[in-house]
Amino acid sequence: MDTRERLIESTRELLWERGYVGTSPKAIQQRAGAGQGSMYHHFAGKPDLALAAVRRSAEEMRAKAEGELSGPGTAYERIETYLLREREILRGCPVGRLTQDPDVIADPLLRRPLEETFGWLRERLARVLAEGRERGELASGLDPVATAATIVATLQGGYVLARAAASVEPFEFAIKGVLGLLAAQTTPSA
């Protein structure tokens, strides 16, 4: 991994652990094993490096979700695969946690990849749900857009509840609950 990549990866990890304010250029450089000159050779400053890191985290999140949501199975099975995949629950979502950082939210450039990622996820889930409805796997009255928003909100809320309780149990209950609600919308032939 070259210096630029080490800087981005180190920043991604630090943002996930500490947030924007808690991630100093010195901490990034130490974790990346890079000097100040190297950092400023590749990036204009901390905001520029943070943006690259946030974009990378968002791209990774979308790629993982796309792989699961494009896989085989019914709409319910693909969403179940996405929701039940292995996650570092107590660390929270690497993208969702950034929405709680006031400095990230106050900066339109840093906020944009978050907004785009959650928008993409809602739209992608809505397409899977619409496909399931069209194929007769899901009830015809199911609203794909509202249901997709509910799934994303439950997932992100599950992370928050788990972190607040220092236990994965609230997350697991939230996911079990939303899957139960979705299962109730499956048709008998599906």
Image (tube, rainbow, N blue to C red):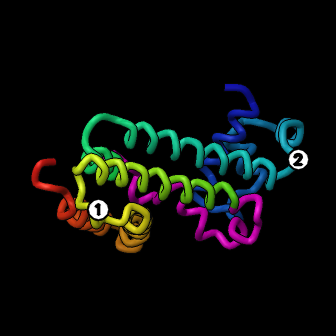
Left or right of 49 on screen, residue 121: left
Q: Residues within 10 Å of mark 2 (few under 14, many from 20)?
A: few
Q: Residue at x 75, y 43 (%)?
A: 29
Tag 1 secondary structure: helix
Q: Secondary structure at mark 2?
A: loop
Which of 2 and 95 lies nearest the eye of the viewer?
Answer: 95
Q: Name, please, the residue furthest toward the top.
A: 1
Q: Which residues are magenta?
A: 84-111
Residue at left offset 56%, top offset 58%: 119
Q: Position of residue 144 (x, y in %)?
A: 38, 61
**Where is mark 2, residue-wise?**
44
What is the chief secondary structure element of the magenta stretch?
A: helix
Q: Residues within 10 Å of mark 1 (few under 14, many from 20)?
A: many
Q: Quadrant of residue 36?
A: top right
Q: Position of residue 117 (x, y in %)?
A: 58, 54
Q: From where the camera sits, is residue 26 visible?
A: yes
Labelled disc at residue 26: none
For image coordinates 69% across by 41% down, the residue present is 8
Query: Disc 2 residue type?
Result: Ala
Q: Quadrant of residue 150?
A: bottom left
Q: Residue at x 23, y 61 (%)?
A: 139
Location of the N terminus (image quadrant) = top right
Mark with earlier residue (1, 2): 2
Which residue is under mark 1? 175
Which residue type carries mark 1? Answer: Ile
The residue closer to the viewer here, 97 or 156, is 156
